Amino acid sequence: GGSPLGGRRVGTDHGRDARLVLIKVTGVDREVIEKWLYVIITLALVTGVMAFLG
């Protein structure tokens, strides 16, 4: 038995992998990335609400 691809689980946490890649490529600290993520998400929510109401 067993799966033909083997028992290794690769890429189970894409969010963390993407963040690590961002840190490696840009050299930005995690706190800065998280702060900008909050800003972007807030702007996206506000824009979506305004578009929905407008």
Image (cartoon, helix red, strand yellow):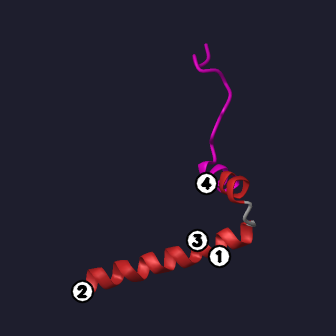
Q: Are marks 3 and 1 in contact (CB under 8 Å)?
A: yes
45 within the magenta span: no
Q: Name the residue rendered at 61%, 54% in the picture.
A: 15
Q: Is residue 7 magenta?
A: yes
| Nearest to N terminus: mark 1 or mark 2 | 1
Q: CA distance from mark 3 to mark 2?
A: 25 Å
Quote the CA–CA distance across marks 1 and 2.
28 Å
Q: Calculate the distance from the C-alpha at mark 4 to the C-alpha at mark 3.
A: 12 Å
How far apart are the alpha carbons under marks 3 and 1?
5 Å
Residue 27 rendering spot, x and y as whole percentages: 74, 60
Give the residue at mark 3.
Answer: 37
Q: Which residue is mark 4?
A: 15
Secondary structure type for disc 2: loop
Q: Amino acid at mark 2?
A: Gly
Callout 4 touching callout 2 (CB < 8 Å) = no
Q: Is residue 1 above or below residue 27?
A: above
Q: Which mark is residue 35?
A: 1
In the image, taking residue 11 as reference, residue 50 lies left or right, namely: left
- Pointers 4 and 1 in contact (CB under 8 A)? no
For label 2, the residue is: 54
Crowding around mark 3 (Cα neighbors within 10 Å: few <14, some 14 to 19, many 20+) is few
Q: Which callout, 4 or 1, points at the residue further toward the start of the chain?
A: 4
Neighbor class of circle 4 (other Cα within 10 Å; few <14, some 14-19, many 20+) is: few
Point 32% across, 85% down: residue: 50
| Amino acid type, label 1 | Lys
Measure the C-alpha gap from mark 4 to mark 1: 16 Å
Please state which amino acid type lies under the numbered disc 3: Leu
Judged from this view, the residue extending furthest toward the top is 1
* Residue interval drawn in magenta: 1-20
